[in-house]
Amino acid sequence: MRRRLFWWELGGFLFAAAAGTLLHFTNDWCGGSTFAAAVSAVNESTWEHMKLLFFPVFFLSVGQVCFLGRNYPNFLAVRAAALTAGLAAIPVLYYTYTGVLGRHIQWVDVLIFFLAAAWVFHLDFRLLSAGRLGGGWQQVLGLLALWGLAFLFVYFTFYPPQLALWRDPATGLYGAAP
């Protein structure tokens, strides 16, 4: 069963990495449609790059819970925890290295995205295998956390706080362009 889980996690990483990369461009490809803006990057802010990790993993989770949920009753809580850790890694790594260097380097930004995606599925594998976060209330909390994050990613795309995390460093603008 552990081997099967490994392949699910590897496939999940590859899917999230590929889909997140494509979502970087879909808003432009779709002419800035509201749906595309809701799930893809609308600017170069750190928040929008976190969204590139969140939505592929979120949509994948909807499918995976059907296949893995029976064998891993801790799936929702573990996925919420692992995804939150991966999302947190993006601003932590980005602001750390840009703070040290005083500038950003595009290939390092891309590497951070892939490292965060790998961290999500590595942590997911470890926690699922160990049977962690298995309580019923933890599953409810995990489900609420995933849907709450989905809501926040969409909401803050259109109504972003005027904070550095949401500021596009290239244009100085926040959120979806009017």
Image: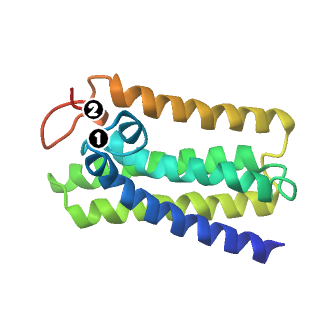
Q: Residue furthest bottom?
A: 3
Q: Amino acid at mark 2?
A: Ala
Of callouts 1 and 2, which one flags the residue occurring earlier in the amino acid sequence?
A: 1
- Residue position for label 1: 42
At 72% from the left edge and 43% from the top edge, which residue is drawn? 77
Front-lying residue, 52 or 138: 52
Q: Amino acid at mark 1?
A: Val
- Quadrant where the image shows the C terminus: top left
* Above or below, comparing residue 57 to residue 155 in the picture: below
At 50% from the left edge and 47% from the top edge, which residue is drawn? 55
Contact? badges 1 and 2 (CB < 8 Å)? yes
Q: Secondary structure at mark 2?
A: loop
- Residue position for label 2: 176
* Above or below, comparing residue 101 to residue 51 in the picture: below
At 78% from the left edge and 53% from the top edge, which residue is drawn? 66
Q: At which x and y percent is residue 68?
A: 79, 58
Q: At which x and y percent is residue 19?
A: 45, 60
At 45% from the left edge and 34% from the top edge, which residue is drawn? 153
The answer for how far apart the CA atoms under marks 1 and 2 are is 5 Å
